[in-house]
Image: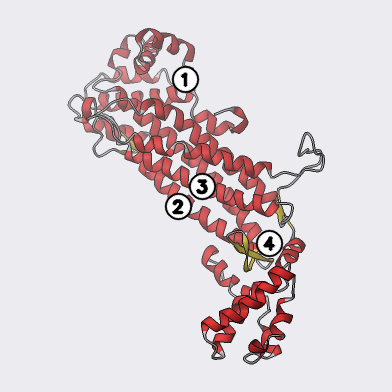
Amino acid sequence: MIPRYSRPDMVAIWSPETKFRIWFEIEAHACDALAKSGVIPESAAKAIWKAKDVEFDVARIDEIEREVKHDVIAFLTHLAEHVGEEARFVHQGMTSSDVLDTCFNVQLVKAADILLDDMDDLCEAIKRRAYEHKDTVCIGRSHGIHAEPVTFGLKMAQAYAEMDRNRSRLAMARAEIATCAISGAVGTFANIDPSVEAHVAEAMGLEAEPVSTQVIPRDRHAMFFAVLGVIASSIERLSTEIRHLQRTEVLEAEEYFSPGQKGSSAMPHKRNPILTENLTGLARVVRMAVVPAMENVALWHERDISHSSVERNIGPDATVTLDFALARLTGVIDKLLVYPENMDRNLNQFKGLVHSQRVLLALTQKGVSREDSYRLVQRNAMKVWEHGADFMAELKGDAEVTAALSDAEIEEKFDLGYHTKHVDTIFARVFGES
């Protein structure tokens, strides 16, 4: 991923230096297990570990690979340059996928840990803003059109619940991807004992893959990247909401605009929602990984490498991008400017029209048929839409309405508190607090 959308801790996971260090650890732990079972001399295992402080020369490994056309062999050749004669005992009974797949899963686990921390930070920011605006009333919209009152805190509570679900999904995906395969060619353990796999798995913080053929099954990876895609979609949903709320004619919330910031090269007045627009785009980049990950599941027989080039791209790109996006969204929420006065202005823009359902229900409770109740309320509502009339005044002036409802009963149906009376109940459901 390009530096513009990258953070160093996540980038470091995917560096060649990190990859080769993980490869070394896999090979060294396997040698320990092989030595313990008497397959190789203990002195050989100890000799391998002498290279633990070596800074592997990426350029040298690349040079060897240009000749041998095989990345794992290139690494093993370079390792032998540091270990010496005892290097002949490295990789006993193993195949390249044992190293590659186990390493990839280690990297995905490390990436998931960073993403889980990111989600904790995001949820904390959303929760703080939810409680801050728990009772800040604003208009709810369906189809982009005024519907009924909600609170801005409820919008944030919804985002929190969604991200909390995503965090649980990611934790499960992390557990599912945390497997190790050291099973040799076609996964039969013919040339290496399962105890070696068990030892490496424990040493690397993984679980042994029950059946690995010659690769770890890619349904695990498909699930992992699918979860990243869902998280990205949730980022886009919240970003899109903020972008709509920042529209000039709405302006109920706005990204923080820092001193000295400029919104347009041509129009000095502009304050654009550039961060949430950026997040919308980044979400698309993360989701690009989902379909290729699904298509990687179907490999030929016990192994092919059609998945390899895909994963070398989507592994770093999806995780680095999502890490950046989560951090950016946390910053947006943390500094989001909220304008309750504008929310109140928009809520009352159509002079009480948003209370139409309460009047409808009240009429049905007074014995008017639902069809007639709807007709009576709608004909008065249309006067508000078309002529800017006052909804309550129109209802009070409609003889058919007042035949069923008194003026006081009509006025009572315009109480905003009616719409927010269960906010505390919803918050208790979301945040588990009374």
Reading the image, the residue beneath label 1 is: 53
Quarter of the picture holding the C terminus: bottom right
Mark 2 residue type: Ser
Sequence-wise, which precedes: disc 4 or disc 1? 1
Mark 3 residue type: Ser
Residue at left 72%, top 85%? 397
The one nearer the camera, 225 or 282, is 282
Q: Is residue 89 left or right of residue 77?
A: left
Residue at left 36%, top 43%? 176
**Secondary structure state at the residue bearing disc 2:** helix
Reading the image, the residue beneath label 3 is: 233
Mark 1 residue type: Asp
The one nearer the camera, 335 or 434, is 335
Residue 421, image x and y in percent?
61, 76
The one nearer the camera, 241 or 219, is 241
Q: CA distance from mark 3 to mark 1?
A: 42 Å
Q: Is residue 74 left or right of residue 391?
A: left
Q: Find residue 168 and name its label.
A: 2
Nearer to us of marks 4 and 1 is 4
Res. 352 visible in picture: yes
Sequence-wise, which precedes: disc 3 or disc 1? 1
